[in-house]
């Protein structure tokens, strides 16, 4: 069965360790730099102090400690979570649709989340209901709702199990929800700034509550996706051949789609819409480890996280003490980098 | 996926426009505790327009506009313009105001939008003068095609801009004398409030919140000058790299700066209050949050540059007096 797979076998562990090391380095960098100038030594000691059974005197003032623990740490962890989830979801979508241009927002997750967030920003009063932040919750529900609606339409209109109808249904749903969102916006122009701020994607102002809310969904979708890498590899030889090997393509597709959409919804709930990561990081990863999903999925998770932590460092420091929208930085920095990699490595198909 | 750069430029435009339109989304009429500001006499028929003053040529956002005769049917497309018209006694000539003009309560509010102006809908009111603060969607040119004169009163950058606009509208509506009186009284009231406010021993710092994503305004904006009168220092001035006057401050920078006073211009529309900001990550350690230095402003008054600026100045004066007493 292995020899059916389209890629040469390469040892999987070194690249994973390498990517993991890079991620740790990026996180440490993200915790050290920022708009507030915290002493590097104090930051390191304070972080080590948080470990169980370690007691160190970090020497930070209460305000510095609050900046580190309540602002910077949740923000870096949010970048890890969002970047990892989006890249992983993108790889999952590309695997299901066998299309290099598939991205996590293909089936209406973005416009569903946009509509949800817009409705709540316009009509809900205040930031949270019973301790749950409302905008993240509405984005999450909207994203999942958009995808499920597209799937319901696409799956019922076609029994043959292909993906073309699903994509078309996704396009229709996305356009419809985007129109609904535009309508709500145009009737409530005074809330536009808040809505747009959300649409650009942001990692500022994320606290522990937002992270806690999506953590279970993020973990569940990550585990499911990483475990489905082998099945996606088998399916890449074609549905019928996969059936001969005992893999039910339709079912695998549904599970991967749901898990990838759950990952997307979790990411969107934290940060709003951040483009580019989900579509580009899996391609970068393929250039380095080949096309086998068993490697592409976990590597996308790690590299997406690293990429977003680093771009967020730029977003926070380039115009400090101001902020740049993270979505602008991802594409601005990411696109030239992507072109360089495209030119410098050999081609690997999805 | 929509393209982010396009979105961004759209948002920058919107942002400017938002500041212009003022955020009025309240449907509750406010209690008119205006302590004798001219705006309170907003029943506004006053004396009739001075017919002898026409035809008149006035400034319209840098251009010149000629108004042939005293206007009898004025349409206002902006809340600040509406407040000014009523304050100078031209309210009796106003036939329609836009959907954001919620003051004075007796202004004839319609579904007209100043933000996405519908020229046909405006022309239904057969106005002989249209006043707006923002040339959105080329509305000025379109109305000019219909031979309707438009006076543009763009967002004021200084108090003097505000007084000049009052005088412009006074000339355009035949109420020059009243407009001059309103401007003089505003000037005197503001000076009196500032003079009566004790100067804190050490200059106080402040943050002016436009929304909960920490968009703010700097010293160089109109609202910034209101604070500057009291010698307050704006903690966001350095964050304004693009020079727009409306930067977004990073949460880290805000917590580190730990301002003495935090003014919320998103209390009504954004549902923010001293309680909600205290729950934000890291904010529970801030001086202003712990010491009662979080001040909820009236969103409308804080985003308009009409006669009610005097009330805004009073609200800031109260906060400065309290904070100064606590600090010394």
Image (cartoon, grey):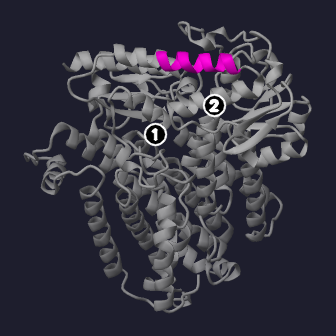
Disc 1 sits on a residue from what chain?
Answer: B
Which quarter of the rendered picture does the C terminus of chain B lie within?
A: top left
Residue B165, numbered circle: 2
Other-residue count near label 2 (Cα within 10 Å), few / some / many at <14 / 14–19 / ≥20: many
Task: State yes or no: discs 1 and 2 in contact (Cβ < 8 Å).
Answer: no
Q: Position of residue A339 (x, y in %)?
A: 51, 82
Q: Position of residue A244 (x, y in %)?
A: 66, 81
- Height in image: B262 above or below B86? below
Looking at the image, residue B243 sits to the left or right of residue B40; the answer is left
Looking at the image, residue B290 sits to the left or right of residue A247; the answer is left
- Identify the magenta region: B176-188
Residue B217, numbered circle: 1
Determine the image quadrant of residue B291. top left
**Numbered disc 2: secondary structure:** helix
Which quarter of the rendered picture does the N terminus of chain B lie within?
A: bottom right
In the image, A31 versus B261, the foreground residue is B261
Q: Is residue B182 magenta?
A: yes
**Numbered disc 1: secondary structure:** loop
User: From this viewpoint, which residue is outermost toward the front?
Assistant: B52
Q: Position of residue A59 (x, y in %)?
A: 10, 45
In the image, B216 versus B271, the foreground residue is B216
In the image, B249 versus B91, the foreground residue is B91
Q: Sequence order check: which comes first, mark 1 or mark 2?
A: 2
Disc 2 sits on a residue from what chain?
Answer: B
Residue B286, numbered circle: none
């Amino acid at each position: 069965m292995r020899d059916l797979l389209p890629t040469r076998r390469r040892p999987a562990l070194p690249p994973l360790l390498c990517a993991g090391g890079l991620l740790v380095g990026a996180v440490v960098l993200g915790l050290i730099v920022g708009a507030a100038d915290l002493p590097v030594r104090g930051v390191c000691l304070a972080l080590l102090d948080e470990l169980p059974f370690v007691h160190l005197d970090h020497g930070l003032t209460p305000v510095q400690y609050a900046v580190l623990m309540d602002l910077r740490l949740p923000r870096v962890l949010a970048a890890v979570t969002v970047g990892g989830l989006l890249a992983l979801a993108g790889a999952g979508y590309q695997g299901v649709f066998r299309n290099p241009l598939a991205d996590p927002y293909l089936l209406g997750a973005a416009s569903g989340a946009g509509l949800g967030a817009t409705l709540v920003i316009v009509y809900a009063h205040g930031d949270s209901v019973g301790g749950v932040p409302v905008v993240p919750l509405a984005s999450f529900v909207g994203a999942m709702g958009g995808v499920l609606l597209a799937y319901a339409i696409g799956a019922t209109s076609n029994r043959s199990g292909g993906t073309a109808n699903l994509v078309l249904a996704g396009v229709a749903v996305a356009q419809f929800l985007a129109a609904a969102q535009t309508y709500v916006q145009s009737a409530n122009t005074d809330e536009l700034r808040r809505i747009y701020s959300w649409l650009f994607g942001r990692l500022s102002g994320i606290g522990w509550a937002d992270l806690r809310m999506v953590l279970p969904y993020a973990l569940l979708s990550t585990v499911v996706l990483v475990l489905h890498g082998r099945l996606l590899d088998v399916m890449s030889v074609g549905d019928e051949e996969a059936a001969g090997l005992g893999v039910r393509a339709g079912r695998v597709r549904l599970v991967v789609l749901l898990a990838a959409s759950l990952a997307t919804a979790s990411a969107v709930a934290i940060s709003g819409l951040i483009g580019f990561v989900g579509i580009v990081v899996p391609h970068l990863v393929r250039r380095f480890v080949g096309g086998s999903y068993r490697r592409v999925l976990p590597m996308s998770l790690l590299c997406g996280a690293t990429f977003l932590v680093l771009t967020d460092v730029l977003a926070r420091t380039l115009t400090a003490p101001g902020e740049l929208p993270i979505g602008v930085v991802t594409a601005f920095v990411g696109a030239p980098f992507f072109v360089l990699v495209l030119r410098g490595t050999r081609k690997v198909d999805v | 996926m929509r393209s982010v750069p396009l979105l961004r430029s759209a948002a920058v435009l919107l942002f400017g426009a938002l500041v212009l339109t003022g955020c009025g989304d309240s449907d509750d009429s406010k209690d008119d505790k205006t302590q004798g500001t001219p705006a309170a006499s907003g029943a506004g028929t006053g004396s009739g327009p001075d017919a002898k003053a026409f035809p008149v040529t006035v400034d319209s956002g840098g251009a010149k506009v000629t108004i042939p005769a005293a206007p009898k049917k004025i349409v206002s497309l902006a809340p600040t313009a509406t407040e000014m018209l009523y304050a100078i006694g031209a309210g009796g000539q106003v036939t329609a105001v836009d959907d954001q003009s919620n003051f004075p309560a007796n202004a004839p509010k319609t579904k007209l939008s100043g933000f996405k102006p519908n020229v046909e809908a405006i022309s239904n009111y057969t106005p002989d003068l249209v006043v707006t603060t923002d040339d959105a969607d080329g509305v000025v040119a379109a109305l000019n095609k219909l031979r309707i004169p438009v006076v543009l009163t763009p967002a004021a950058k200084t108090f003097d801009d505000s007084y000049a606009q009052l005088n412009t509208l006074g000339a355009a509506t035949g109420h020059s004398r009243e407009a001059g009186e309103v401007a003089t009284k505003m000037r005197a009231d503001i000076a009196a409030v500032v003079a009566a406010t004790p100067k804190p021993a050490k200059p106080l710092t402040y943050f002016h919140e436009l929304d909960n994503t920490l968009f703010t305004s700097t010293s160089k904006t109109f609202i910034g000058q209101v604070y500057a009168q009291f010698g307050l220092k704006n903690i966001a001035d350095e964050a304004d790299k693009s020079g727009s006057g409306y930067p977004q401050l990073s949460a880290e920078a805000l917590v580190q700066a730990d301002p003495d006073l935090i003014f919320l211009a998103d209390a009504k529309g954004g549902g923010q209050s001293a309680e909600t900001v205290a729950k934000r990550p890291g904010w529970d350690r801030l001086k202003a949050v712990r010491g009662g230095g979080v001040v909820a402003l009236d969103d409308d008054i804080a985003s308009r540059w009409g006669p009610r600026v005097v009330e805004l100045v009073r609200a800031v004066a109260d906060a400065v007096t309290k904070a100064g007493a606590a600090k010394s």
